[in-house]
Every structure is written in structure tokens, then in C-alpha cells.
Image: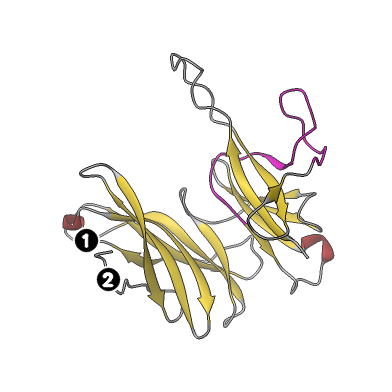
Amino acid sequence: DRFRIWYICCSPKYNEDYTERLAKDGRIAYAVSRDGLHWERPNLGIHEYAGSRDNNIVIPGPWGVCSVHFDPRDPDPSRRYKAQVRYNCHSAFFSPDGIHWSEQGRMSLSAFDRSSVHWHPIEQHWFASTKNWHKVPGLEDQRGRGYAESDDFLSWGPLSYMCGTSPDSGEIVYGLEPFYYESQFFGLWDRYRHEPLGLLDVQLAVSHKGRHWTRPSDKA
């Protein structure tokens, strides 16, 4: 009867007058909503921050992207919720309720930041959209998106090339978050262009099986 959201919140990167760079530090927090517009941050009292447990933190420490999943297929109720959390690597967390989490160790996933994990509803396995460097014959290594599969969320198969842009395009695909609807996958293609202003915008991408992606248009 409620919408639920898990989100990254980070401590300030610099001090108040920007004369000192601070340690990068983040947490995963939790909020609920009745209508998807007005959100409440419950006082969970689980983890301490700034000398107090009066907060909505559910996983302390991560400073990169995360993905949280409700998994009703898993027969183990302690694994009902799964989270991919990035520290210096990608770690797995399991939870019975989405609030109390236990770390399960490092995921054998070769990926940088802006990588995410998803469920493949047709093939019934987990797959990852990863940020990686890929070798292009005769050219310098090129940043693009990789694809990997897992049956248990922890152990991952080899990485394959999923999509990218040509070196002379002036842009890179910085992120790709897929979701399945009706009979195909749709994705949010994060296009980064260093020139003229270092902008990142979001475009539509499509795929039949989630392994290879195209944009209906790259002009939007």
C-alpha cells in the first residue's frame, strides 16, 4: 500500500569555504510514499551518523551507485530483497524486509561506476549493464557498456560488449538502465558530451533481448 525508495545520499565533498577536500562518504537511505509525490523518511534508528541514530539510513558506507530489488522468486525469505552496492568494488547485500541488510561479500562483476543489475523476466536470470573500457581493433580503448549474467546475484559470467559510440562521435554512453515492457527492453541511455559544456542527457534505447542496444534517434 506504499511506494518505497532506496537512494544514495552523500556527505559534503568540500568544507564550507571550499578550502579543504573531504573524504568521499555515502549511505543508502530509505523513504516511503502513499502517492509517489510526497515522501516520508522514517526514523529507523539502525545506523549512527553524526553521533545519532535518528535517521533513515539502511546501509552505511557506499559512495557509488546502487540497485535494490524485491525478489519474490527466491525461496529463502532472508534473501527477499537484494542490493548491488558499490564501494571500491561491487558488493551484494540481502535483506528479509528491505530495511535490515547483511553484506554477502564481493560480487564477481567486472564493472566501474554507473553499473547496474537487473532481472531478465524472459530468461529468468540476473544481468548487469556495466560501465567498462573495450578494445577496438586499430584504435584506442573505448568506453562503452558491457553485459554479464548471473544465476545467484553473486557469481557472474564473462563480460561481453553491449553497446557504445564511435571515438569520433564526441560522446559516450555513460550509463544504460534497462527495463522490460510488453515484448522488449527499453533503456535510459545516458549520453555524455564533454564539449561544449560537459552535458549529460538521457535518450531512449531499445533491445529485443537486452544484450545489444540501439537508439531510435540520437538527435533528441
Quarter where residue 10 is shown: top right
Question: Label 2 near label 1: C-beta < 8 Å?
Answer: no
Secondary structure under badge 1? loop
Q: Is residue 52 magenta?
A: yes
- Dot 1 corresponds to which residue? 166
Image color mode = secondary structure
Residue 195 lies, with reference to residue 134, above or below; the image says: above
Q: Amino acid at mark 2?
A: Ser
Answer few, some or many: residues within 10 Å of disc 1's Cα (few below 14, many 20 plus, some between 14 and 19). Answer: few
Q: Residue at x 45, y 73 (%)?
A: 186
Q: Nearer the viewer, residue 125 or 220?
A: 220
Query: In the image, is 42 to the left or to the right of 211?
Result: right
Q: Residue at x 31, y 47 (%)?
A: 199
Residue 103, image x, y percentages: 72, 48
Evaluate whether residue 104 shows in this view: no
In the image, the segment drawn in magenta is 43-67
Residue 79 lies, with reference to residue 27, above or below; the image says: below
Residue 168, image x, y percentages: 16, 56
Tag on residue 197? Answer: none
Secondary structure under badge 2? loop
- The main secondary structure of the magenta stretch is loop
Q: Nearer the viewer, residue 1 or 22?
A: 1
Residue 196, image x, y percentages: 20, 43
Mark 1 vs 2, N-terminal side: 1
Query: In the image, is 56 to the left or to the right of 127?
Result: right
Tag on residue 217? Answer: 2
Q: Residue at x 57, y 83 (%)?
A: 122
Answer few, some or many: residues within 10 Å of disc 2's Cα (few below 14, many 20 plus, some between 14 and 19). Answer: few
Q: Nearer the viewer, residue 130 or 178?
A: 178
Residue 66, image x, y percentages: 58, 51
Evaluate whether residue 118 shows in this view: yes
